[in-house]
Image (cartoon, grey):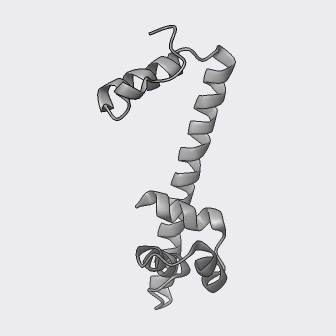
Amino acid sequence: MSELQEIPIILKGDRIFEKVFEVAKFTNLTKKEMNAHWLARKDYWDHIHIMEYAEEQGEKRGERKGRRNTKLAIAHKMLQKNIKLSTIQELTGLSKETILALKIKN
């Protein structure tokens, strides 16, 4: 197993072996690579939580002003209808990252 660089074709599609190879690849990272991995993962989750908070705050403000269909809610509905990202950006004025965060959340 320590000699293999990638999963053999015969084992591809087997979830257990794919998970074993994923773990093996992760455990072979250098300390610097491991730190970079965890920092990237932390940044990713920080971004998700920031977007969730922003969405909650936007919805609260929209409700206070009688506007239940905030830009985020509209973008969310458009994503559910499989409307193209560029179209959602154009119509809502939201950034690509904001829309992608909504997509990841679902």
Residue at the far front in the pictured view: 10
Horizontally, residue 94 falls left or right of residue 14, namely right
User: Which quarter shows the N terminus?
Assistant: top left
Q: Quadrant of residue 7?
A: top left
Residue at the far bottom in the pictured view: 66
Q: Quadrant of residue 37?
A: top right
Residue at the far top in the pictured view: 2
Horizontally, residue 96 falls left or right of residue 83, namely right
Horizontally, residue 80 falls left or right of residue 37, namely left
Q: Nearer the viewer, residue 61 or 3?
A: 3
Residue at the far right in the pictured view: 32
Q: Residue at x 38, y 21 (%)?
A: 20
Residue 106 vertical placement versus 33 (above, below): below
Measured as percent of width and height from the top left, residue 11 is found at 35, 26
Q: Nearer the viewer, residue 26 or 60?
A: 26
Q: Nearer the viewer, residue 70 or 3?
A: 3
User: Which quarter shows the C terminus?
Assistant: bottom left
Q: Residue at x 52, y 75 (%)?
A: 72
Horizontally, residue 19 falls left or right of residue 90, namely left
Q: How many marks?
A: 0
Q: Residue at x 54, y 18 (%)?
A: 5
Measured as percent of width and height from the top left, residue 18 is found at 38, 28
Measured as percent of width and height from the top left, residue 42 is found at 57, 38
Q: Quadrant of residue 92?
A: bottom right
Q: Residue at x 55, y 76 (%)?
A: 84
Residue 52 vertical placement versus 62 (above, below): above
